[in-house]
Image (tube, rainbow, N blue to C red):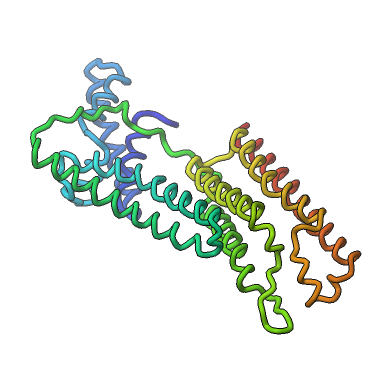
Amino acid sequence: MNTLTDRYLAATLRSVPAQRRDEIATELRASIEDMIEDRTGGGEDAAAAEREVLTELGNPDRLAARYADRRLQLIGPTYYLVWLRLLKLLLSFIPALAGTVVTVVAVVDGKGFGAIGPGLVIALHVAVHISFWLTLTFVLIERSQPTVDLPDWTVDELPDVPAHRDISLVDTIASVAMLVLTIGYLPLQHYQSWVRASDGDNIPVLDPALWSFWLPALIVVLLAIAVFEIVKYRIGRWSWPLFGVKALLNLAFTVPLAGLALSDALLNPALGERLSWLADADNRNLLNALIALGAAVVLVWDLIDTALKTRRQTT
């Protein structure tokens, strides 16, 4: 069901304490039904009566605040909900976008592992500035125009009842965490790998020549995949356009990786000096083939699994 009453209840209950939701839902639904029945008993149309009752009850966020005994006066009751809605919107993507851009630019400049720190700092700074300046703006607006009339709330603003989320937060966090660790490892192995030369110097696992283009490019792709995982979670379910984007991103990572492996350009040639079995060309070619095969198997498996999920969730 997705009636106006259902949508009103969903919008109200999302902002009340979880332990009281069932109690408030039962009480509020009964009150709404009684009010509608009173109106329809006088000959009023049921749909019109429902709209009038919900309009009379007012903005569900304000009603939820009364149920939770929560004061809406951080900015002031007139502008609080507008400020909160705009703040959530801006913080949902601008800091992450700014941090990602700074990280990518730093990687391209050759900063390697050190590119992650400036990106995180910039994202935090942007979030703080957005919060401060937006709050200050609303404070000044309220002080200069305290009696401005904002548009009245109507039932047409009610969001749909939240659909069942087929993409869990736990899976999204795990995916993003693995991507971040992978991005971090790529520059880290250049300075601190598990292979040491006879004199104790570090031997990168991947060919250092790849930093001229391929490793920064692969990091950009991994960052794009991380952003995709967040967007996918916000949407909440698979769709064929999402599947197409995922397929393109996976191909953008797997094809270069497999190609570098098969052309013997992925692993550092210096590894053969320390790992004698890699000095043999046949062993090296076998390892490169296994890397390429493993990447291809993961790609195909992931695309098949995603296609089955998409088909199930779109039918």
Return the x and y of residue 314 as percentages of the image width and height: 61, 33
Q: Quadrant of the C terminus?
A: top right
In the figure, is residue 285 to the left or right of 46? right
Return the x and y of residue 189 as percentages of the image width and height: 63, 68
Q: Quadrant of the N terminus?
A: top left
In the figure, is residue 254 to the left or right of 129? right
Please give the name of the residue rendered at 24% of the width and 39% of the height, measured from the top-left corner.
82
Please give the name of the residue rendered at 56% of the width and 47% of the height, measured from the top-left corner.
224
Q: Quarter of the image holding residue 7?
A: top left
Q: Which of 154/123 is in front? A: 123
Q: Which of 263/237 is in front? A: 263
Please give the name of the residue rendered at 83% of the width and 63% of the height, measured from the top-left corner.
287
Q: Which of 158/298 is in front? A: 298
Q: Quarter of the image holding residue 275?
A: bottom right
User: 40 above or below 139?
Assistant: above
In the figure, is residue 217 to the left or right of 290? left
User: 247 above or below 278?
Assistant: above
Q: Quarter of the image holding residue 161?
A: top left
The residue at the far bottom in this view is 199
